[in-house]
Amino acid sequence: MSIAQQISTIQSQLKSSSAKLIAVTKTRSIEELKATYDAGILDFGENRVQEMVDKQSQLPNDIRWHQIGHLQTNKVKYIAPFVHLIHSVDSFRLLKEIDAQGKKVGRIIPCLFQMYIAQEESKFGLDENELLSILSSPEFAELQHIRIIGLMGMASFTENEAQVAREFNSLRELFIELQSKEIGYATGLVEWKELSMGMSGDFLLAAQLGSTMVRVGSAIYGARS
């Protein structure tokens, strides 16, 4: 199937949910990205900053670029002028740098806190106590060029669907708790509206469990060579 056909199939599968499709375009060619854009997708997810910067300069300006991979503080400045959403904020140090770079370019940069939900050492993310500590910090309330609009999480890479469902449910329950208690709202920096979870192997399960954004690459493009 063509890229457009794969996208159409995935979107029809997501129709009954509120999940938006983000095409994970890391390592994909400019031609593949153009085909994705021509199929009506405007949300592109990249892992590596340099790759995102290179592609952004060659593609239409209305594409919404999502930083979905681990982000180093010294790389923030390269994407601050244009990034649509940073999914992978996993420390207050990183958040402060995003705020500083947002100030330099005169932008408020939307962010998600990445939560650690997997049973894998290789994954990044905050635990609930770390998240609450950041949100209650006086230093957090002083930031002016970021907006926290939700949470992101990556489930374990396993064929055990029950385990993946437990991990997604734990993230959704935290998300609902943050919404219901309006945690962080008083700062004016927080709005709990996006829950980014689900990738090519588990996006349908994630969508069923309340994800608002699924990050899909190989299900659109095939396995990376």
Image: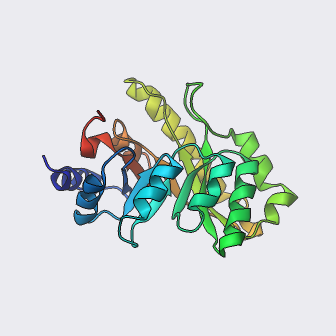
Residue 4: image quadrant is bottom left
Q: In which quarter of the image is the C terminus?
A: top left
Report whether 140 appears left or right of 23: right
Q: Where is residue 199 in the image (x, y as percent from the top left)?
A: 39, 41
**Residue 220 seen by the camera:** yes
Q: Position of residue 46 (x, y in %)?
A: 45, 50
Residue 148: image quadrant is bottom right
- Badge count: 0
Q: Residue furthest bottom?
A: 106
Q: Position of residue 154 (x, y in %)?
A: 50, 38
Question: Which of these two is toward me, 60 or 44?
Answer: 60
Q: Which residue lies furthest to the left in this view?
A: 1
| In the depicted structure, whether residue 71 falls above or below residue 163 | below
Q: Position of residue 29 (x, y in %)?
A: 30, 50
Q: Residue at x 67, y 40 (%)?
A: 126
| In the depicted structure, whether residue 162 falls above or below residue 6 | above
Q: Which residue is drawn at 69% across and 64% down?
A: 101
Report whether 224 appears left or right of 198: left
Question: Which of these two is toward me, 18 or 201?
Answer: 201
Q: Which residue is drawn at 22% across and 62% down?
A: 39
Question: Which of these two is toward me, 69 or 127?
Answer: 69
Residue 204: image quadrant is top left
Report whether 36 appears left or right of 169: left
Q: Which colour scheme is used?
A: rainbow
**Residue 149 seen by the camera:** no
Report whether 181 appears left or right of 6: right
Question: Which of these two is toward me, 37 or 158?
Answer: 37
